[in-house]
Amino acid sequence: MKKISFSLVIVALLLLTACGGQKAAGGTSGAPVKITYMEWGDPAELDVWKAIVSDFEAANPNITVDVQVSDWDSYWTKLKTLLAANSSPDVFAMDAPLYLDYQARGSLLNLQPYIDKNPGMLDGLFPITLEAYKTPQGYFGLPRDFQTIVVFYNKDMFDKAGVAYPKAGWTYDDLRATAKALTKDTKGDGTIDQFGYVIDPWDMEPGWSEIVWAYGGDIISADHTKTLVGEPKARQAWQFLYDMMHVDKSIPDPNTTSQYGGDLFLSGNAAMMAMGHWAVPSYSEATFKWDVVPMPTGPAGQATSVNSAGFVIGKDSAHPDAAFAFIKFVLSQAGQTRLAQMGFACPVLKSVAASPAFLQQKAQINNQIFIDSLAYAHMKPVFKGYDEWASVVGDGLTPVWNGEADLTTTLDKIVVDADAVLAKNK
Amino acid sequence: MDYGLKPLGREKLWLGVMLGPTLIGLVFGALGSILATLVLSFTHWDLLTPITPAGFSNYVALFTNPAYLKALINTFEFSAMYVPGVVIVSMFVAVLMDSKIRGISIFRTIYFLPAVTSAVATALVWNMIYGKDTGILNYYLSSLGFQTVCWLCTKNAMVSVVIVNIWGAIGEGMIIFLAGLTAIPSEYYEAASIDGANVFQVFFGITLPLVTPSIFFQTLISTINAFQAYDYIYMMTRQGQGDSSVPVVVFSIYRNAWNFFNYGGASAQAIELAVLVILLMGFYFWLERRYVVYE
Amino acid sequence: MNRTKQKNLLDLVTYLLLIAGGVLMLGPFLWMVATSFKLPADQFTHTLIPNPATLENFRNLFSFDLNFPKLFLNSTIISLLTVIGQMLTCAMAAFCFAVVKFRGRGLLFTLLLVTLMIPEQVTLIPNFIIFKWLHLVGTSVPLWLPAFWGGAFGTFLLRQYFLTIPRELVDAARVDGASLWQIFWRIYLPLGKPALAALAIFTFQGAWNDLLHPLVYMPTVPNTTLTVGLAFFQTQLTLGGRFTVLMAGALLSILPLVVVFFFAQKQFIEGIALSGLKR
């Protein structure tokens, strides 16, 4: 009887597939082709991408692009499931630090032959944004837009406290003094409820990489074998952050942050925050006036972080030419202009970064600062095993930030654990 | 429990028809993926490159990785508070709900609301409730002159998330018990009422013994849910983009599978979790044979 | 007389307890409702009555081109098919496990329960590969088809309930010459209504709120479910601190569940009347 039921189900399945299945048309040249582009984002981004796609389709009548957008966490789950089942999308978005995890595992198509067929294609792009995707075999991905980190500050809060706004060229000591002046117990209940400065100490990008570099330290060695966050200069930076958090109490510790449920800067509980351009659209609805200022200068000079979102093509894409044509279009003046208007990120194409499309947005802030920051920006490290390494460091330091563990000994241990992750991913 | 109708003659066919879908599901769905998980737990797989054998190394890692051991201990601690909490509270609620008073449908719906609300919204609301200045709980505590409490700080976070998880599970538990309570023949209550039994005598003499099948079910399901709980926990206590301040096993499975390119390790953790629950299940079934009253 | 008094007192106590508990259960939910009608600037205020109240969050939600009616329809179809599949196949299997004697019953039941123990994070990929092999990825079939394969949770739930149905009924029916199917159809299904209602609520809710499977199996909005469509907002809204819009979305997505629950719970009427059944 097991056999009977089984064949019944098979028949049912066949019927269902017959009704529901639509086979994709073959991809011979000239015939219409359909490619899939998958990325993370939100509904507002989807709207922009739909506009880009319709421009692209108008210019390339025989290519249609199916845009699939999901939120950040879902995106990676879906992408990995698809890749594991050999159903890779044609083009998909890539966060630069994770790029080598996919490239080194052979999931990506080498774009170099296509780039070679389009000489001068990369000339107009900011060179540093290309760094992350360079490999000895060429580019397996290209940047789509980039993020630099700057300090956002709440003007109303500064005005109220009678503190002067931060200015370009300020130092970390200025930051510390300013933050201290703005840290207050406004309710008078014995606990601080307004913080001078807020960072996400878990994350290197708007968290700690900028200060580590400004103190002359570094994150990992160029050959990706050694973790450098425990070196003496980096330790000075860690100590500086630790003192702001536990001596001045001008940076909230993670336990305190978690009690606010969301973004302390947006909720009006923090005067300054290290952040990227992605926060601009939602902050444009803030109820207070704010602006941005470059990262402060440290003993080893000024430093910030630059990271990019990019795209890659799946190794087994059936339509690599169409896929590359799409990438090329997004990197063009037209594509970059639309992306810039979206306001989440900075365009990688220099001409668009200098155009009103980027510089004059809904939020009346000095967008030029994000571009100028490139002059002293370090690339957010890109290496295999990034996610696990970042978790070892981030999770490892959390007890320190919460005042439950000692900084020095914890760093000693983290470096060992983090090096083990690097060794595993060699 | 060796009671049962013997199928007669052609009824064997009926038995096949009725069990057929379940058997197919077992063979082609569930058992297949369990077997796959078991096999994968002895391999290294990053999802992108071919699978390579790993021997027992994924299992050895279970005992040598301090972060994982912490998650395992947390999972047990969480379950030890959550399971009795859900079972007792939802049974109590169901007993109250099993009456004919006016407006009971409204009450039932109200108690069920937390169970259907999306986890993200629930976690956010509770974050606001537990919050420091923004939190309504501390707002009332301090306006009543009490010391405010840091609900989501490392030392209190476990209890705080258990409360939210129980809160979210009462609705479902209530339904299980309500359905179970309806199976108690009304004659029993009428007889007790004629004998002049008081509320407590009725509860302990009739309701409790006759609702043991539901208690058994709810305990087992709550245990499974407790061992697999992570959504509220991680939404409420995640530190930045990292781990939760109350790390639990399922979140570790999630990160290993989807963030760390370690599907083999995640599979081994899943198998270990399953084995632990199965052991507990064996214990429950032993209890069932002793204490659960059917019919 | 005295008994009526006692009954009234008991009802009063029940009411008081239910109201007290109801405040705890409803409080956070009410706050969610309140937040969804507040201006974003007021999202952290402690008042339960939004002042001023606004529909802006709902308008904001609908301002995106997500095709909510389509999402809603997809969710409804998938959830209903899931409910039908589960009620049918779980009830049949539960009847066999609870009532019929056959070889390997205990073992089979244990195996079934074991399938509950593996977290879905690790079974996702094996299942995905099976459905890819069946060419069903990209359709909604992988979301509801498994419901027609039975399921451990529903079978277990109904079996527990069926076990409490008095066996005299079965024996009496057998004497009258009823077949297995007749006993199932005429006795167990009607008497099992409360448990079936519970299962319907659970499966509808489970299918409606499922995020992982529609996400992986279906394309993007609008060809996916409402839950996935709303989750799409979440990361950005949470990071951007726009909780008011998020709450509005959450509120909309649970309305159908509340309606389903309200009608299904009417099946939880009190006790089986034994005498009435014996006829």
Image: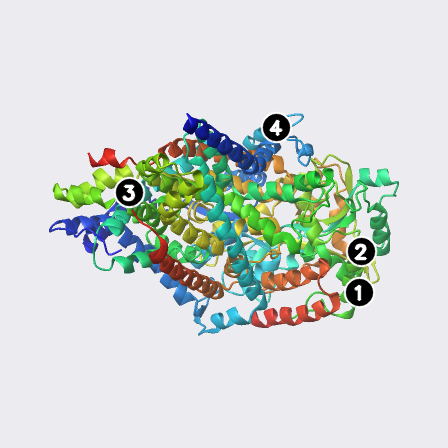
The CA span between labels 4 and 1 is 48 Å
Q: Which residue is mark 3?
A: C88
Discs 3 and 4 share one subunit: yes
The CA span between labels 3 and 4 is 43 Å
The amino acid type found where label 3 is placed reads Leu
**Which quarter shows the C terminus of chain A?**
bottom right
Local SS, label 3: helix
x%, y% of residue C103? 21, 59
x%, y% of residue A43? 56, 39
Local SS, label 4: helix
The amino acid type found where label 4 is placed reads Glu
Residue neighbourhood size for the residue with mark 4, other residues' Cα within 10 Å, grouped as few (<14), some (14–19), many (≥20): some
Discs 3 and 2 share one subunit: no
Quadrant in which residue C140 is drawn: top left
State yes or no: discs 4 and 2 in contact (Cβ < 8 Å): no
Discs 2 and 1 share one subunit: yes
The CA span between labels 2 and 1 is 12 Å
x%, y% of residue A179? 82, 49
**Residue sitting nearer the eye, A298 or B6:** B6
Q: Which residue is mark 4?
A: C56
Question: Can you tell which mark lies on residue A236?
Answer: 1
